[in-house]
Every structure is written in C-alpha cells, then in structure tokens.
Image: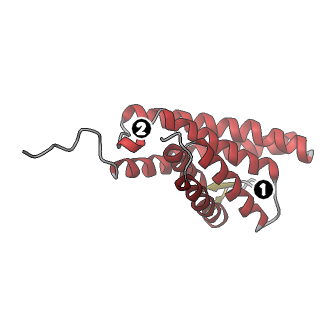
Amino acid sequence: MNNKFTVKHIVAIGIGAAVFFILKRFVTIPTGIPNTDIATAYPFLALLGVVYGPVVAGLAGFIGHALGDLTTYGAWWSWIVASGVLGVFFGLLAKRIPIEQGIFGKKQVTTFLIGETIANLITWIIIAPIGDILIYAEAPSKVFTQGVVAGITNSVVTGIIGFILLKAYAQTKTKKGSLNKEA
C-alpha cells in the first residue's frame, strides 16, 4: 500500500462506492431478521481496504451504503457510519498483508480472517447498535439482535468471498524476485 493519496485513490473511492452500492442494493440474502441481510458488499469492501487502505475503503463504504439507503427506505445513519468504520478497519489490514507484492499465504490469510472477523463483530455488535440506540432511540434487544446476526453473517461471508477475492488479486501480481534476467 502506498501512503501517498493520488487520483487513483479518488477513482477507487468512486468506483468502490458504486460497486458497493450495487452489491448492497441488489445482491443480498434476507436473514429473517427485519432490516438485516447477508451482504455481499462487505467482502468487496475488504478487498478495497487491503488494496487501497483505510481512507479509500472507509469512504467507499460510507458513500456506497448511503446511496443504497437513500434509494430504498431512507438514510439509516448509524449503519451507514458503521459501514465506513468497517472499511477503515479493513484498510488497516493493508499494513499486514503485502497484497501488492502478490503475497497472500497462510500467515496473511490467517491475519485477514482474524482481522475481518474482529472488525465485523466490533462494527455490527457494538458500533451499529449503540448508534441505533443513541440516534434513533431503538429498543436495545432489537438492535443487538440485528447486530449479532449481521456480525456473524458478515464475518462468514467476508471470510469466504473476501478470501477468494484477495487470493485471486494476489495471483495477478508479480512476486518480488520471481523474474530472472536472461543473459
């Protein structure tokens, strides 16, 4: 990950927010718990975070979720902010996963799976429900139930699909020292 913010990062935010919006809006699976779906947008957000870092993933998650909410039932700010925070958490994994060097071995996979699980559980079981209570005066039993379901399902989906996306991305990169100069 490059620490310099460039036009490439701005484009990644725009494209990332658009893809996140499409996945969040149209590619979800109902859980049976009201307003809580299994979202395929979060594995993509994890890829974005590991590749581009916390600022890009945080903004893409925030903007993409806001667009999704605004085109359906209206903005639910506690969960919009939570998606942005989750993107930041995913982006922090970039420091420990050298994906641009084509490295995504057992150590990096373990780091990703542990990191994304912790990030999802903190975001959906703590941050989003507390936001619901503080902003919307929602019933704690309702929002913590939604949060637990979202935390577990997003952890599993991000772990499986995110692993596949990151593995495939790493394979497109040339590993350092893998090319030999011909005499």
Disc 1, disc 2: CB below 8 Å? no
- Residue 112, numbered label: none
Residue 139 appears in the picture as rendered: no
Image position of 140 with respect to 69: above or below? above
Residue placed furthest toward the right: 137
- Element on which disc 1 rests: loop
- Residue 108 in picture, x, y percent from top left: 42, 35
> Is 93 on the left-hand or right-hand side of 124?
left
Amino acid carrying mark 2 in the image: Pro
- Residue 24 in picture, x, y percent from top left: 65, 60
Front residue of 147 and 136: 136
Tag 1: Cα neighbours inside 10 Å, few (<14), some, or many (≥20)? few
**Looking at the image, is mark 1 or mark 2 nearer the viewer?**
2
Give the residue displayed 50% in from the left and 38% down from the top: 94
> Is 112 on the left-hand or right-hand side of 18?
left
Front residue of 124 and 148: 124
Image position of 36 with respect to 132: above or below? below
Amino acid carrying mark 1 in the image: Pro
Image position of 117 with respect to 173: above or below? above
Would you name the residue on which mark 2 appears? 98
- Element on which disc 2 rests: loop
Tag 2: Cα neighbours inside 10 Å, few (<14), some, or many (≥20)? some
Give the residue displayed 49% in from the left and 46% down from the top: 51
Q: Quadrant of residue 132?
A: top right
Q: Earlier in the sequence, mark 1 or mark 2?
A: 1
Would you name the residue on which mark 1 appears? 34
Residue 65 appears in the picture as rendered: yes
Residue placed furthest toward the left: 183
- What is the basis of the colouring in this image? secondary structure
